[in-house]
């Protein structure tokens, strides 16, 4: 596995350009990157302007010049079953994100399955599955055109309980996620495993990963306290990391070990962020190596 990180560890759009972030992360030693389009949906963002493709091409050019690749990306997060104008616009941005991922060379783009209120009994789960099949089926048409896969991410029940007053979040458990992905029966649909979400959900992560098996196409690697989605580095929370890495090896996972740890980096003054990223790199090499690597 290559050690990768989301570019959002250096998301600071008024002071750090994506091109500068790419260059700095390559200098630290990261071999692959994840582009989070969620960050770039604000008013005035170059991603929402008409010249978005040229902007993305410039980021790809910088990555090529410093020898790193974009292996995955993250699409917008929103209530996909809404009917207001904001939902329609974010749906358009979801399609655009897939096209942008193709420009970057990312093989996969991550989205979260959607939920709506109900009993979460057999009939409700079947309805949830079908609604997600229909919604993501439209995205899949764009994905097929550009050759980018859609990786559906596990979530955690606590999020929708706090934010949207739902009993549960569909696909917070591996069985639902596997069932949804298998229902597509499509080579461009797989799974992204978020270790932080799984920790909040109190899942046995090695067992979950073994159940997912070859469906696993991407990772969001982050630690937390088991209650909040803190997005911090491994060993700064409560996750047991060695069994997870071993499970990834046992299932023959072919993707990257991709950090989503912006809260261990972004709060710092920019002068200290590279030092934090070097620590992140060393922790990753430690987890992926058979013995403690030389980092300093």
Image: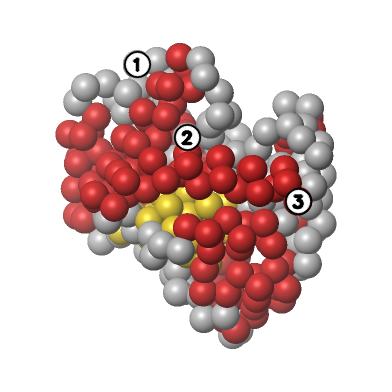
- Residue 50 left/right relative to 4: left
Q: Earlier in the sequence, mark 1 or mark 3?
A: 1
Q: Residues within 10 Å of mark 1 (few under 14, many from 20)?
A: few
Disc 3 target residue: 122
Alpha carbons under labels 2 and 3: distance apart: 29 Å
Name the residue located 20 percent from the left edge and 40 percent from the top edge. 58
Q: What element carries label 1?
A: loop
| Above or below 17: residue 249 | below
Residue at x 47% of width, y 58% of height = 184
Assess disc 2: are there few (<14), some (14-19) or many (≥20) residues with their C-alpha within 10 Å of its C-alpha: many
Whichever of callouts 2 and 3 sits on the residue coming sooner in the sequence is 2
Check whether the beta carbons of the residues at disc 1 and disc 3 lie within 8 A of each other: no
Residue 44 position within the rendered picture, expressed as x and y whole percent measured from the top left: 35, 16
* For discs 2 and 3, the disc positioned in front in the rendered view: 3
Gap between marks 1 and 3 measured at Cα = 44 Å
Residue 151 percent coordinates (x, y)? 48, 55
Q: Where is residue 75 in the image (x, y as percent from the top left)?
A: 44, 40
């Amino acid at each position: 596995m290559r050690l990768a990180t989301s570019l959002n560890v250096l998301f600071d759009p008024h002071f750090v350009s994506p091109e500068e972030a790419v260059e700095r992360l390559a200098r630290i030693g990261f071999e692959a990157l994840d582009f989070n389009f969620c960050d770039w949906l604000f008013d005035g963002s170059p991603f929402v302007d008409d010249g978005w493709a040229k902007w993305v091409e410039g980021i790809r050019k910088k990555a090529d010049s410093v020898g790193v690749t974009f292996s995955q990306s993250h699409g917008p997060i929103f209530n996909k079953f809404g009917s207001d104008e904001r939902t329609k616009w974010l749906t358009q941005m979801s399609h655009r994100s897939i096209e942008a991922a193709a420009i970057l060379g990312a093989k996969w783009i991550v989205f979260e399955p959607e939920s709506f209120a109900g009993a979460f009994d057999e009939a409700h789960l079947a309805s949830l599955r079908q609604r997600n099949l229909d919604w993501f089926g439209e995205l899949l048409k764009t994905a097929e055109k550009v050759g980018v896969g859609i990786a559906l991410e596990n979530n955690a029940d606590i999020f929708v309980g706090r934010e949207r007053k739902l009993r549960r979040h569909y696909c917070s458990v591996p069985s639902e996620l596997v069932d949804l992905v298998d229902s597509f029966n499509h080579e461009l649909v797989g799974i992204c495993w978020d270790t932080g979400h799984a920790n909040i959900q109190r899942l046995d992560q090695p067992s979950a990963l073994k159940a997912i098996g070859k469906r696993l196409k991407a990772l969001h690697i982050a630690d937390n306290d088991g209650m909040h989605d803190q997005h911090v580095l491994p060993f700064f929370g409560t996750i047991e990391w060695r069994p997870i890495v071993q499970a990834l090896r046992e299932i023959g996972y072919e993707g990257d070990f991709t950090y989503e740890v912006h809260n261990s980096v972004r709060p710092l003054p920019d002068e200290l962020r590279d030092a934090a990223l070097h620590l992140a790199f060393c922790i990753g090499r430690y987890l992926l190596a058979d013995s403690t690597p030389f980092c300093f």
